[in-house]
Amino acid sequence: MKQRYSYQWIGLGIISILLGSCGCTEQQARPGMRTSNLPAAQTNSVALRFQEGTDHSQTVVQSAVELSEKYSALSEEMVALRQENHALATENAELKLRIEVLEQDLSQCEGELNETNALLLDMLGELNEWKSDVLDYRNEMRDSAKAQMNALLKILSMMGAEVSDSQEVSQ
């Protein structure tokens, strides 16, 4: 009998706790005081998330069908996004390989360009040297021709020929 009374008291205690705790879930908040650890905007969005799709006239079966449709749509979207992600990853890998090949080609072309520039600079130096040599040779030939003409004039004047001023070689 004692045991029976103790079960009754325990049952009454549980019921009183449950009835008393119903009022505790909705605390009255003072201005500036948060009711939970979440910010007020986030608390509202969390509450709205669970209230948005709930239509009190829907049955459990209709809700389950609606949620199943949403799940299947999201699953299809996830599969499409995974495929797109995989395609982009594959394209990225291909582009990285292409970049490596192009960088090698670029470094090879830069080396060839440097060699060609050095060769062109050498050729320019040789061309300038040749031009200088040709001009020097031309001047030498003129000087030589003048010397020959002067020598001929001296020979002619020694032989007794009269040389007029117009025939003299100007220097």
Image (tube, rainbow, N blue to C red):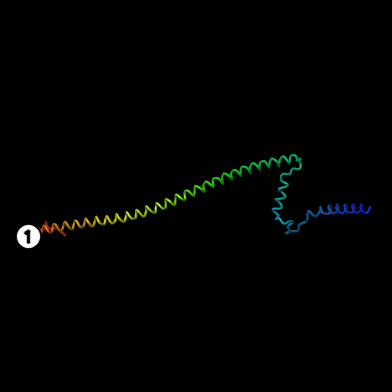
Q: Residue furthest right?
A: 1
Task: Find residue 63 and report its horizontal and vertical position in percent.
Answer: 73, 41
Quadrant assignment, res 160: bottom left
Using the image, determine if residue 81 lies above or below residue 43: above
Residue 140 versus residue 58: which sits nearer the camera?
Answer: 140
What residue is disc 1 on?
A: 158
Looking at the picture, which amino acid does disc 1 mark?
Answer: Met
Q: Is residue 127 rendered to the left or right of residue 32?
A: left
The residue under the point 43% across, 51% down is 108
The quadrant holding residue 25 is bottom right
Depicted 58 relative to depicted 39: above or below? above
Query: Could you tell me residue 67's position as x and y percent?
Result: 71, 42
Quarter of the image with the C terminus is: bottom left
Secondary structure beneath disc 1?
A: helix
Would residue 121 appear left or right of 10 to someone viewing this image?
left
Q: Name the residue at 58% across, 45% down.
A: 86
**Left or right of 25: which side holds 75?**
left
Q: Position of residue 19 (x, y in %)?
A: 84, 52
Residue 104, percent from left and from top: 46, 50
Relative to 73, does residue 157 appear above or below in the rendering?
Answer: below
Number of numbered discs visible in the structure rendering: 1
Place residue 40 in its image quadrant: bottom right
